[in-house]
Image (tube, rainbow, N blue to C red):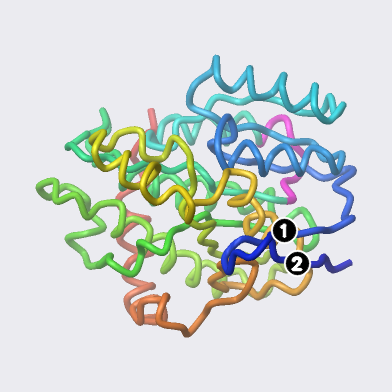
């Protein structure tokens, strides 16, 4: 059952995705679902009567989001689970709980993300931006693959950014232990894109569809760690060109629900943008992708284990 995409007003980048698809009997995990695009995505999916797991770092905000979604949708099958995507130990604990409580996972949306302007090293020794935006999604996704395989035609949606154009990925990058350069956001989003395409190749025979989506520039808490002058420029001066969280959720929903999405595809504005100027050539380097996967796998293999 396919959906339809319609343009919002006169904007060239704002679209509304409409679909009558029901998620009854389906289980969906949305990381960073307490605010912004994550909240709006979870809200829409809850209206489709699925079991929605809000995976959030902040317990208080997560519980508030849960109550609000239940109130707005009438769907009482919405639960909060604590998850800090910057900590591999938190991810392992989350997966352990999910594996015990859920028979299968139908949709995984790796939405949680962060931009840091100052160096922030986690207790596990990783740069916070890179850990949240890349290591976390890598580990969460690979640990949940068995549950995703138990659902026919399951989906993995990695929420990325057009900032991947300015990123670079090599063995030094993936280690993420170098001096802080303020390129970590760009690098992490490019790494996530390369990971998505390699993941799609590895799971091609399973029926799982993995995609990468740029939701647009959103008025959200993503920029909360930037200096106030940059926040003013992005959210204030550029306001007419910035999407609301509900508008930013549309391409994410498209990738989660639309039948026609292609495995490993790069989506933007509810359209496939592969092999355009927006996608770095390194995203198609299969040799680099294999090395990135192997390096990341070694790095996170024992991290967060007791």
Bounds of the magenta span?
A: 99-106
Identify the secondary structure beneath mark 1: strand
Relative height, residue 93 to residue 110 (above, below): above
Q: Are marks 1 and 2 in contact (CB under 8 Å)?
A: yes
Residue at image coords 49%, 35%: 92
For the stretch drawn in magenta, the main secondary structure is: loop
Find residue 5 and name its label. Answer: 2
Where in the figure is residue 15, as x and y percent of width and height?
Answer: 67, 62
Q: Nearer the viewer, residue 50 or 241?
A: 241
Query: In this figure, which residue is indicated by the disc labeled 1?
Result: 16
Residue 37 within the segment the image draws in magenta = no
Residue 120: image x %, image y %? 22, 34
Say if 68 sits above or below 298 in the image: above
Residue 184 picture location, percent across and down? 25, 52
Query: Which residue shows up at 10% across the image and 47% down it?
Result: 179
- Residue drawn at x 76%, y 65% is 258
The reply, left or right, for residue 278 in relation to residue 152 is left
Image position of 3 (left or right of 256): right
Q: Quadrant of residue 90?
A: top left
112 to 267, vertically: above or below: above
Q: Which mark, by number, is residue 59?
A: none
User: Few, some or many C-alpha atoms within 10 Å of disc 1 (few <14, some 14-19, many ≥20)?
Assistant: many
Nearer to us in this view, 59 or 214: 214
Around disc 2, counting alpha carbons within 10 Å, would you say few (fewer than 14), some (14 to 19), or many (20 or more)? some
> Measuring 38% from the left and 36% from the top, which residue is drawn there?
86
- Mark 2 residue element: strand
């Amino acid at each position: 059952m396919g959906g339809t995409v319609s343009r919002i007003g006169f904007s060239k980048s704002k679209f509304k995705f409409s679909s009558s698809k029901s998620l009854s009997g389906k289980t969906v995990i949305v990381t960073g679902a307490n605010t912004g695009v994550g909240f709006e995505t979870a809200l829409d999916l809850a209206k489709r009567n699925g079991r929605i797991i809000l995976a959030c770092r902040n317990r208080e905000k997560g519980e508030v989001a849960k109550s609000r979604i239940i109130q707005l949708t009438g769907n009482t099958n919405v639960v909060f689970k604590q998850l800090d995507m910057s900590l591999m130990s938190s991810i392992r604990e989350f997966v352990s709980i999910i594996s015990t409580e859920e028979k299968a996972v139908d949709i995984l949306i790796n939405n949680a993300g962060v931009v840091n302007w100052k160096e922030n090293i986690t207790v596990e020794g990783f740069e916070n931006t890179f850990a949240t935006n890349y290591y976390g999604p890598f580990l969460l996704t690979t640990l949940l693959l068995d549950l995703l395989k138990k659902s026919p035609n399951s989906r993995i949606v990695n929420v990325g950014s057009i900032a991947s154009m300015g990123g670079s990925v090599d063995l030094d990058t993936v280690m993420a232990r170098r001096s802080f350069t303020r390129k970590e956001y760009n690098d992490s989003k490019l790494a996530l894109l390369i990971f998505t395409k390699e993941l799609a190749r590895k799971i091609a025979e399973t029926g799982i569809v993995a995609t990468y989506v740029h939701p647009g520039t959103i008025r959200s808490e993503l920029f909360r760690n930037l200096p106030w002058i940059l926040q003013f420029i992005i959210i204030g001066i550029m306001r007419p060109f910035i999407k609301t969280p509900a508008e930013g959720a549309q391409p994410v929903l498209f990738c989660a629900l639309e039948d026609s999405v292609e495995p490993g595809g790069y989506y933007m504005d509810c359209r496939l943008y592969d092999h355009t100027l927006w996608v770095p050539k390194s995203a198609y380097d299969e040799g680099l992708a294999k090395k990135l996967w192997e390096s990341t796998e070694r790095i996170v293999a024992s991290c967060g284990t007791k």
